Image (cartoon, rainbow, N blue to C red):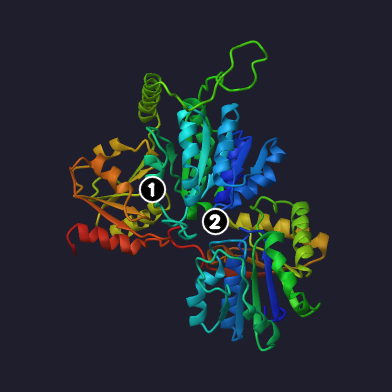
Amino acid sequence: MAKILMKGNEAIGAAAIKAGCKFFFGYPITPQNELPEYMARELGKAGGTFLQAESEVAAINMVYGAAGSGARVMTSSSSPGIALKQEGISYIAGAELPCVIVNIVRGGPGLGGIQPAQSDYYQSTRGGGNGDYKLVVYAPANLQEAVDLVMEAFDVADYYRNPVMVLGDGMIGQMMEPIEFREPKKRELPPKDWATTGTEGKRKPNIINSLRLDPAELEKLNQKIQAKYREIEKNEVRYEMYNIENAEIVFAAYGTTSRIVKNAIEMLKQEGINAGLIRPITLWPFPHKAFDEIPETAKAILTVEMSCGQMIDDVKIANNGRLPVGFYGRSGGMIPSPQEIVNKAKEMLGGAK
Amino acid sequence: MLNDKRIKIIIGHYGSGKTEFAVNYTLKLAELGKKVAIADLDIVNPYFRSREKEAMFKAKGIKIIGSSIGSNIGADLPALSADVLGPLQDESYDVVLDVGGDAIGARVLARYHNYFKEGSYDMFCVLNAYRPGTQNVEDTIEHIKGIEGQSRAKVTGLINNTHLLRDTSVEDVLEGQKLAKGVSEKLNIPIKYVSTLEKVARLLPEDIEGEVFPIKMYMREDWM
């Protein structure tokens, strides 16, 4: 009985604790509530502190503080709650601090609804906050992957001193699946000699700050951060290529939607149509090179999202004008069915075959 | 199962498969010719609630009661419908109460306490030995006591629904049966059903304690 059955939200919480998360600051919102609920119950037992803040803005600034002192820290929310955290996220990126942010996405815009969506792709990869910053964004498609990526996210955040986001649609948060906890691959993590832990009169104070009034100094910071992002783009891109060989049509989809697409691929195979899938696991850095590996047989790319079309922008950039790029999406908490996806694929390939 | 009491309360840990059992059980009652109502009392979970299957129940002549606010899928408010009282009072109904997970979810039951006279109801606790919190006898008993305390009703039967979704094997169910047996002996509550996917149910030993209850997965989409 190595595997246990967990709900996505609690599995993410359990993974964070296993990864050494010592602080959690959050504020409730559906469909991610089981995550803070789990942390409220379990984090204290693991020697950490759970605190329900008075707002999302307060929570992310508590994350800023805890991260500045070198602790492993996490917050979670859902779409509009993450929108509220954007200022703090930009500050954390500007101050080059590690933290993990979980977004269990619900339908938008505005307060939207509680059903699953993927309409925070722009918010996650383009930044809702100000300035030239990036988050590493992981998009798990099942709970085992969610658990693995959450554990790794803490290492990646520490390694690059950058906030990392784990983006799951509401389905990932709410569904149950068997999981097991596995150690991520070992990384040599640098000591946190920048953290504000008290000088004991032995060294100069460390300063955690994102305000730099000298433009030359601020530009230097930007250049440093950008160099780090190039490094991340080189080392951290993650994606899955599925059934791509001889594919006539290549789907691009992430998270829950990629699972539905895999069903659609099976259905297409029954009809004699070869279809493949590129599934980005990191939304940033986006797996551009996966699109260079699309075989000659492919006539089109079809992006499927639970949104009105956001990742399609990156798919078009990666495709670089080579193939026609189509889109099928449902939004507001509606989930595309495999049949709808099959129909759209056939339409793109030119009707009945 | 026709010997079960008129009021059937389904409780358990979330993830135990309560709702999947409740849905299958309700459909079976209707198939056996009973006049059935199912009340979705889950005010804890926002997803995977029996109210989502309103159309399916209605097509089979089953009364389904969800939130009082309507909007059965998107409702994010813990609103119970007054309609729940109808089938609780109307003795021509067999009524299934599909309760939210854990003691927190079971708290709503206290509101219907007056209807739970000893001998007039069954309260079935659905167990999944793969769920943290109900993996050993001690934890499971604590779990049951918590629910009984909140609901002011007593568990009258155990349901071994140990599963790993579609990957469930006979061994998994038998592992869960050990847990159910341990709890059953300690609390002197019978194992009423062994609930599992049809393909697994066929392979279970014939002398297994409790009635084998094959189920389909109605709440989990094929692609999941």
Q: Is residue A32 left or right of residue A296?
A: right
The residue at which mark 1 appears reads as A254
Q: Name the residue rendered at 49%, 76% in the picture.
A: B56
**Rendered location of residue A132, percent (x, y):** 37, 32
Spatial CA span between label 2 and label 1: 21 Å
Which residue corresponds to mark 2? Answer: A30
Task: Give whichever of B170, A349 is nearer the camera.
Answer: A349
Q: Position of residue A49 (x, y in %)?
A: 67, 38
User: What amino acid is found at the position of numbered circle 2 in the picture?
Assistant: Thr
- Seen at 77% across and 59% down, the residue is B146
Question: Mark 1 falls within which chain?
Answer: A
**Measured from the top left, where is residue A207 in percent x and y?**
55, 21
Query: Residue B181 vs residue A28: left or right?
Result: right
Amino acid carrying mark 1 in the image: Tyr
Q: Is A141 above or below relative to A112?
A: above
Q: Earlier in the sequence, mark 2 or mark 1?
A: 2
- Front residue of B14/A229: it is A229
Specify the subunit that label 2 lies on: A
